[in-house]
Amino acid sequence: MDNAIPPAADAATADTQAADSFDIVARQDKTEADVKVLRSDVDEVKARLDKVGRAAIRPAIAGAPATPEVKGFVDGYLRRGSTAEVKSLSGAAPGDGGYAVPQEIDAAIARELTAISPIRAIAQVVQTGSAGYRKLVSTGGTASGWVSETAGRPETDTPTFAEIAPPSGELYANPAASQAMLDDAAFDLESWLASEIAMEFARAEGAAFVGGNGTDQPMGFLSAPTSLIGDGARPFGTVQYLGSGDAATLGTEPETRLIDLIHALGSGHRQGASWVMNSATLAEVRKLKTADGAFMWQPGLVESQPDRLLGYPVVEAENMPDIAGGAFPIAFGNFRAGYLIAERSATQILRDPFTNKPFVHFYATKRVGGQVLDSAAIKLLKIEA
């Protein structure tokens, strides 16, 4: 029997195979087109995400003002002296000391100030809306105890409070720029101004937070009353100190005095405590060794990590006194709990193109106060026999 396929069947099969091949090619073309569309969509989404990411990490103060308010303040008031752009930004008038800077510039000043002002970086900072600030601190009372399930509850002691009202003063800076600098559109005026103001503020703050007398300025922690009496028995607001054992130096066994200073501080405050001293004192402390010959001072092993002394970070504050008879060259404590800085949030700027022509001065002011908050959180080392 002949099983050969008729010619008509061969033609039909060929047509079917051709159609199938055409369909396959068409589907492949459609798939490739869909893939190209998807790739284009993915690339577009990626570009948008990259743009958002760059915007998120971009500093608030960049080469160009970030908002219309900043642009109006910088190009209008700072560069040309026009007040039309800033009247809506603040209710201040020139007679009140200038105009409040936009939030972006004020934030840039605050960031730089925290980075270069040593005590501000470790203390507690609160923002206030008025010139004065008060805080109540509990000094006793509200006692607790143990009782059985059905026993009566004895009356607790009456709580007692002390009021903290940090002395404050007007902090000012007066950087100057030439008119040619201001006329140069490429000159990053807002970044320059924020840096100059922060630098001047930091110099003045550094002295006031350490040794300020409280008259038209903060009360420094070294200006607080001091006593040898331990915690619990000292009057509120009095800072404890330990003697060095020598009338003019750190003593014959300074390492033991530093260890005593650490443990004079309560265990709760030792979490987050820091050493504070100037560079001359630190140079002497860095030479100290333990009994086995190891240096007590340890450099930071990672970039941006502070150096450490006996396991605690060291903060260099150049306004701390040198080692001398009767001085307090070393402080140790939890300054976030021990020292309070209260400041009005807005920085005021007054443009002055007349006093020192051809230079334009920018008179910046800010009200800042400071005082010891918890005297048990700070300990001092005094040079005395």
Image: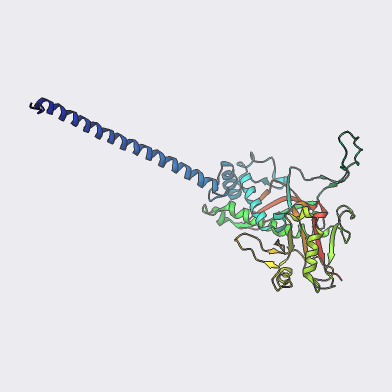
Residue 381 visible (yes or no): yes
x and y, in percent, of residue 276 in the image:
74, 62
The residue located at (67%, 49%) in the rendering is 349
User: Residue 356's image quarter?
Assistant: bottom right
Q: Please indicate whether residue 77 sits to the left or right of residue 207 in the image.
A: left
Up/down of 303 relative to 88, above or below = below
Count of numbered circles in the view: 0
Q: Please indicate whether residue 50 sits to the left or right of residue 84 in the image.
A: left
Relative to the observer, which residue lies in front, 40 or 203?
40
Q: Please indicate whether residue 331 sits to the left or right of residue 43 in the image.
A: right
Up/down of 34 relative to 337, above or below = above
Q: Quadrant of the C terminus?
A: bottom right
Relative to the observer, which residue lies in front, 114 or 99?
114
Q: Quadrant of the N terminus?
A: top left
Residue 102 visible (yes or no): no
Extreme-front residue of the structure = 1
Relative to the observer, which residue lies in front, 280 or 232?
232
The residue located at (10%, 25%) in the rendering is 8
State the scheme by which the image is colored. Answer: rainbow
Relative to the observer, which residue lies in front, 138 or 167?
138
Up/down of 142 relative to 21, above or below = below
x and y, in percent, of residue 253 in the image:
80, 72
x and y, in percent, of residue 225 in the image:
86, 58
x and y, in percent, of residue 46 in the image:
44, 43
User: Residue 102's image quarter?
Assistant: top right
The residue located at (53%, 48%) in the rendering is 64
